[in-house]
DNA sequence: TGTCTGACATAGACAATCTATGCTACTCGC
DNA sequence: GCGAGTAGCATAGATTGTCTATGTCAGACA
């Protein structure tokens, strides 16, 4: 069953996907496909969400991109993390974890005597 | 360290807080304070977020409210879950869990040989 | 009477995703 | 070599929900 990507997490997912690819830079479609497939098709990354996000991250300096060619010789922009991008990934991971734990505390309150 | 409440989750947190209070209806300030304290002050529920959310949920029929008096004799609106609200809470919990797992799958990919 | 404060409420700003659409350039068929 | 189909990139506008800022009302207390 499909779910929307919560606001603010798309950047995190893209950063993590690029970090997971290690040295190999990915182009937009590859990033989107990776997120969709790893999430078990729960998330669908629309192009109208993906490219603005990549633009934002280019401006922030978190990623850098070079034009290249796909296996079947099409134009594509290959992105990779910068050092600042790795730092941002760390920050975003910590932030997401705080949010996740705070929500968990409310959803599963530790039982306590009246 | 404070974090913003992700879009779409405030309703869930309110529903869960009301459900946790069982029979005792809560007014707005109590709901906000409960969310803030249980989250360890990670979340701060602004009034400008809280009341519109409560209005939405009243319109949806997920909660009902009656005017009453606080312990120190102030006007306050006490909210409690409706049957539809309990069903919505179940749906929202399942949805949140799917999202959480999908994100986890991307953040912590199961290691796999090349 | 006047100030302070708890509690409810609304308007407008803002941010990020989604829907819809368009562009460019390569491939392939004829 | 020319037109149709399509991969990949990109942008505009709508939508949604939270936050900031502000306002109102009524009770407590000096």
Image: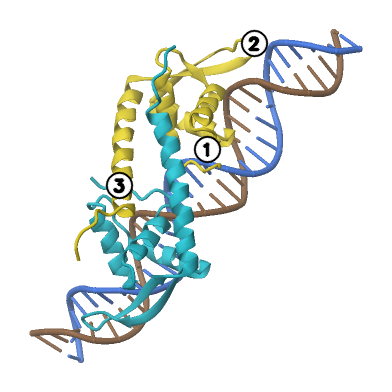
Chain colours: A yellow, B cyan, C blue, D brown
Tell me: residue B78, above or below residue C12. below
Residue A21: quarter of image: top left
Tell me: residue A19, above or below residue B73. above
Residue at mark 2 to residue at mark 1: CA–CA distance: 29 Å
Secondary structure under the numbered disc 3 in the rendered image: loop
Q: Is residue A39 left or right of residue B3?
A: right
Question: A43 and A57: which one is in front?
Answer: A43
Tag 3: Cα neighbours inside 10 Å, few (<14), some, or many (≥20)?
some
Q: Which residue is mark 2?
A: A72
Residue visible at 55% across and 34% down? Answer: A41
Mark 2 on the same chain as mark 1: yes
Which chain's residue wears label 1? A
Measured as percent of width and height from the top left, residue A5 is found at 48, 41
Q: Is residue A3 left or right of residue A74?
A: left
Dot 2 or dot 1: first in sequence order is: 1
Q: Which residue is mark 3?
A: B3
Q: Is residue A77 left or right of residue B52?
A: right
Residue C13: quarter of image: bottom left
Tell me: residue B67, above or below residue B31. below
Secondary structure under the numbered disc 2 in the rendered image: loop
Secondary structure under the numbered disc 1 in the rendered image: loop
Which chain's residue wears label 2? A
Q: Which residue is mark 1?
A: A42
User: Are circles 3 and 1 on residues that touch, CB within 8 Å?
Assistant: no
Measured as percent of width and height from the top left, residue A50 is found at 53, 32
Q: Answer whether residue A21 is visible to the viewer in this image.
A: yes
Q: Is residue B39 left or right of residue A3?
A: left
């Amino acid at each position: 069953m499909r779910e929307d990507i919560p606001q603010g997490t798309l950047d995190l997912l893209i950063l993590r996907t690029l970090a997971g690819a290690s040295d190999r830079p990915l182009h937009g479609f590859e990033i989107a496909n990776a997120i969709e497939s790893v999430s078990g098709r729960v998330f669908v990354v629309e192009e109208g969400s993906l490219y603005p996000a990549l633009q934002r991250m280019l401006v922030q300096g978190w990623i850098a991109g070079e034009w290249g060619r796909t296996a079947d010789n099409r134009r594509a922009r290959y992105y990779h993390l910068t050092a600042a991008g790795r730092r941002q990934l760390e920050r975003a991971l910590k932030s997401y974890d705080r949010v996740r734990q705070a929500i968990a505390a409310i959803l599963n309150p530790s039982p306590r005597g009246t």
